[in-house]
Image (cartoon, rainbow, N blue to C red):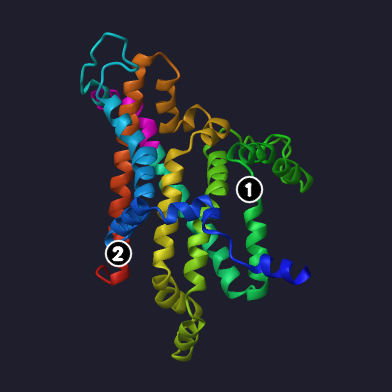
Amino acid sequence: MRDGGDASAGAEPPAGGATGWGKLVGFAPYQAFVALVCASPRRQFFLLAAFPAIWVLSQHLGPIVQMLYVSFTDAYPVTSGVEPRLTLENYRRFFDEAFYRVPFYRTLVFATTFTLATLVITYPVAYFLTRIVSRRNRLLMLLLLLIPFWVGEIVRTFAIMILLGNNGAVNLLLKWLGLIERPIPFMYTGFSISVGIIYLTALYMLLPLYSALEKLPRSYGEAAADLGAGPFTRFRRVTLPLTLEGIASGCILVFLISTGFYGTPVLLGGPSTTVFAETIAGFFHVAGDEWPTGAAFATIMFSTVLVLVLVFQRFMTSLRKGDTR
């Protein structure tokens, strides 16, 4: 009985006991469909790329196209039974009223300044991690730098507010050192926005720089030193040119993020530091007939930033190729 039981246990299951997936695989129309779809590498590629393409078109490009359409309408949402009328008045309003152009230019200046400041601050940190810290401890150091970014933007912004407040850690430290008698009003100024945005965007600059510096062989610097190049010359002639790709990636990321910040400027800034995102949001906080104006202003900012990024990317590409002097 035992031998018979073992023999029956090791026997193959009958054909009628196939699972649902086994039945589908053996289904003739399914086999014909798979053979048709996977007949060539090109068809396999289109099959794999179908879902990402649909996602990008619907979730990324779709809202942009919708915003572009709304920017040319006279009112949105459209009242039932009323045909929307296309107009350029929403764009003309930006160019006719200087009141709206001031925060636009301020945003571009702020974003450029913040990008350069973030680059100057984070480049030495990335260099320290890749050249000074041992390979065994780099992961731990990166983890320590990443921990604050696990918290949301608003929470980190409130942390900056607590740090720079009249009774914050900075003013208390300055009082303790005897450098001031009254608190310095750091909050609601360009300085507080600078500290907040640089703090929030530092990671997006650090990671590309870290990646570029880590891939840079140490032998290049050692060879330059053997040829008599000093530390500054080695950095200017070897390290900096070979990390331009990381610099370009980090600067583009920080610049794009800086131009779109809304919550941080609202919490840390004041009337004299209003950025264009606040102006755009103001149109969406009122009646629907102002939404097309907000969409038009958002389109202007989006187009301007896109052009600036393309020009910067082209410049950095030519710089890497040695076309500019």
| Disc 1 to disc 2, C-alpha distance | 40 Å
Q: Is residue 127 magenta?
A: no
Residue shown at 45%/57% (left/top)? Answer: 250
Q: Which mark is residue 101?
A: none
Q: Which residue range is magenta in the image?
A: 92-106
The location of residue 203, given as percent across then percent down, is 55, 54
Residue shown at 48%/38% (left/top)? Answer: 261
As helix, strand or loop, the secondary structure at mark 1 comes to helix
Q: Which mark is residue 150?
A: 1
Residue 282 position by quadrant = top left
Q: Are marks 1 and 2 in contact (CB under 8 Å)?
A: no
Residue shown at 25%/10% (left/top)? Answer: 82
Q: Which mark is residue 41?
A: 2
| Between 59 and 135, the one nearer to me in the picture | 59
Magenta-highlighted stretch: main secondary structure?
helix
| Between 22 and 157, the one nearer to me in the picture | 22
